[in-house]
Image (spheres, grey):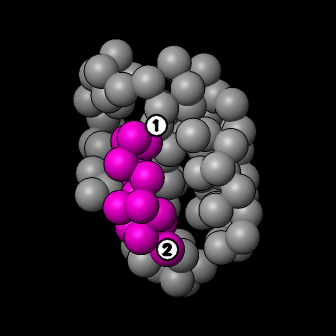
Amino acid sequence: MVKLITDLVELQNIFETNSTVIIDFTAKWCGPCQDIAPVFEELSKKNPGITCIKIDVDNENTKEICSLCEVNSMPTFIAVKNGTIINKIVGASRNSLVSLFTSAS
């Protein structure tokens, strides 16, 4: 299940309790974000060892997270292992997202 994160403290708690995390930076108005969302959900179910979260880039409380992760386009997916970014993809490519999950596991 994909969890929506709404602030930096919540994200830090996720990093402290989960070794591998994939973040989906998304926006409600972003068509490609909405198109790839079911694929992200499907991959999260197929990879229970990876914690999958979403961050709404339009939420005032997540602006700092977006800045820290250098998110400039949506969708952006970032794989984090033990608190370190290991991979980042921009765009709604199913193949790229599958590769991101593979590299994170």
Q: Is residue 22 visible?
A: yes
Please state which of residues 63 and 3 is positioned toward the viewer in this rendering. 3
Q: Position of residue 95 (x, y in %)?
A: 72, 70
Residue located 59% across and 51% down the image: 101
Q: Which residue is mark 2?
A: 39
Quick one: label 1 or label 2, which is nearer the N terminus?
A: 1
Mark 2 and mark 1 in contact (Cβ < 8 Å)? no
Q: Is residue 11 above or below residue 24?
A: above
Element type where label 1 sits in the image: strand
Say which quarter of the image contains residue 5.
Answer: top left
Residue located 44% across and 24% down the image: 19
Q: Is residue 85 above or below residue 58?
A: above
State the extent of the magenta-drawn residues as a range.
39-56
Residue 5 bears which disc, if any?
Answer: none
| Figure quadrant of the N terminus | bottom left
Magenta run includes residue 64: no
Q: Is residue 58 visible?
A: no
Q: Which residue is mark 1?
A: 21
Q: Is residue 84 left or right of residue 53?
A: right
Instruction: Give amino acid for label 1.
Output: Val
Q: Dot 2: within a 10 Å radius of its alpha carbon, few (fewer than 14), some, or many (20 or more) residues?
A: some
Q: CA distance from mark 1 to mark 2?
A: 16 Å
| Figure quadrant of the C terminus | top right
Residue located 35% across and 61% down the image: 45
Instruction: Give amino acid for label 2.
Output: Val
Q: Dot 1: within a 10 Å radius of its alpha carbon, few (fewer than 14), some, or many (20 or more) residues?
A: many
Please state which of residues 26 and 104 is positioned toward the viewer in this rendering. 104
Please state which of residues 26 and 92 is positioned toward the viewer in this rendering. 92
Q: Position of residue 33 (x, y in %)?
A: 53, 73
